[in-house]
Image (cartoon, rainbow, N blue to C red):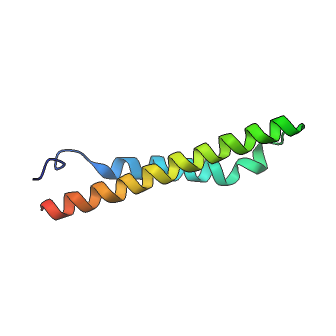
Amino acid sequence: MCLNQRKKPIVTLPIGTIFLAIAIIWPKIIHPSSMPGQNWDDFLRGGIFGIAIGMLLMTGIKMRRQRSCE
């Protein structure tokens, strides 16, 4: 069944790439001064990496499904 033809998966690709770039440059922007701050910093950076990877994987899956329907 081709239910994903109307959805445009390519729209989420730049958003996922932006999240990936933010996660990569995060240590150069944010410098926590305390140890609990470092833990939260690692937690937030890992969360941004997770969002980016998830969005990029979902974009690939949606693009594959869309191509198989054509």
**Residue drawn 35% across and 47% down?**
11
Q: What residue is shown at x 84% (from left), y 39% (from top)?
A: 32
Q: As displayed, is residue 23 above or below residue 63?
A: above
Q: Position of residue 62 (x, y in %)?
A: 28, 54
Does residue 64 lie above or below 54 as drawn? below
| The C terminus lies in quadrant | bottom left
Q: Nearer the viewer, residue 12 or 47?
A: 47
Question: Where residue 36 sits in the image (x, y, percent)?
Answer: 83, 35
Snapshot quadrant of residue 45: top right
User: How many numbered dots are placed on residues in this image?
Assistant: 0
How far across and down, in percent of the image, does residue 15 sit? Answer: 46, 46
Q: Is residue 34 above or below residue 6?
A: above
Residue at 28% across, 58% down: 63
Specify whether 53 is left or right of 29. Answer: left
Q: In the current view of this chain or complex, which residue is farthest to the right?
A: 33
Residue at x-position 89% and y-position 37%: 34
Left or right of residue 64: residue 39? right
Q: Position of residue 20 (x, y in %)?
A: 57, 52
Q: Nearer the viewer, residue 12 or 36?
A: 36
Taking depth in this image into account, of 55 and 6 the one nearest to the observer is 55
